[in-house]
Amino acid sequence: MQNWQEKKRSSFRWKWALLFVILVVASAGAFRMYSLRGQANLPKAGQAASAPRAAAQAAAGGVKVLVLNYHKIDNTHHSLAVTPADFESQIKYLSDHGYNSISPDELYEGLAGTRELPENPVLITFDDGYKDNYTNAFPILKKYGFKATIFAITSFLGKYPHYFTWDQAREMEKYDISIQSHTVDHKSMTDLTDEQLREELVDSKKKAEEELGHSVDYVAYPTGTYNLHIAEMAKEAGYKAAFTIKYGNVDESSNIYALERVPVFHTVNTNRDFLERLKYIPIFAKFGWSKS
């Protein structure tokens, strides 16, 4: 009787031991699957540290272009004013990490499939036409051989002291700094009548073309405000494309008259925030924060 009870207890222990082993193996497998799923959704350490690699991988699935948006490059304490030192650090980072600057025409043709874009393309843009774009940003861009685009408020150039002149605009264009339209007076376009909209879009285009001697084909909406009607009017005015301040990369699903840009601001740690914006664009896009 005692032997039978001992055998029963031994068998019972073995069953529990076997069950324990099965649970451990199953738990390990589940944890492994969960870990792999998490790794698939997050950038690997090497990818997170190398924005160009991530951009190159993304480009394999279609055109994807980073469009940066600056305003002022000076030492004033304002969110729109990136210091010259920080701006140079950012341009140097782009240069050191294999980014290649492009023009709006190159972006347009790349999206149309008529031009092969360079690896890790970046379009650097400025809004408004501040004089410091000429005095501070321009020398840095020349130093690193980077192209850029300035969307200028045409009635402000040569009229107000804090904006560059048309002579300075023509000088910058000799070094691949493209001057495009930011309308005549920088009015919020959603507040205007159709007649006023047409004047802002058409007159700024004509003025810039007269001063620069070439076609002006691109516009950035003041303060980024627009709607589909305004986008259609930009098309009717003769622009090939228009830029907003919607956050995200430009790709083949972008509306050509509502192209995304990544704004760069002065913050407590401007350069850290700049790098974070570059790295986390894919995450913002995944959750639908970049396109609307």
Image: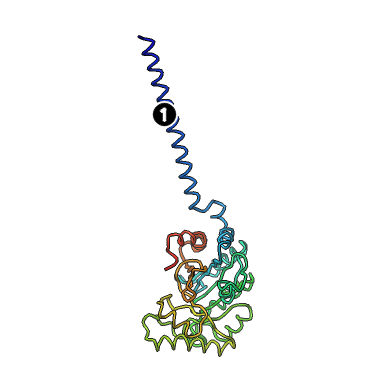
* 11 relative to 208, above or below: above
Type of amino acid at the residue the image marks with label 1: Leu
Q: Which percent across, then down, holds residue 182?
A: 48, 81
Q: Name the residue at 57% across, 59% down.
A: 57
Front residue of 236/157: it is: 236
* 219 relative to 268, above or below: below
**Is 190 on the left or on the right of 142, as rendered?**
left
Determine crowd level at label 1: few under 14, some 14-19, many 20+ residues with C-alpha closer than 10 A.
few
Q: Which percent across, then down, holds residue 275?
A: 52, 61
**Is 114 on the left or on the right of 202, as rendered?**
right
The quarter of the picture where the N terminus appears is top left
**Is 191 on the left or on the right of 161, as rendered?**
left
Front residue of 210/117: it is: 117
Front residue of 148/249: it is: 249
Within the image, what quadrant is residue 194 found in?
bottom left
Provide the residue designation for mark 1: 19
Secondary element under disc 1, as helix, strand or loop, is: helix
Count of numbered circles on the image = 1
Q: Name the residue at 54% across, 82% down.
A: 217
**Is 137 on the left or on the right of 38, as rendered?**
right
Q: Which percent across, then down, holds residue 232?
A: 44, 81
Q: Name the residue at 41% across, 77% down.
A: 228
The quarter of the picture where the C terminus appears is bottom left
* 106 relative to 52, above or below: below
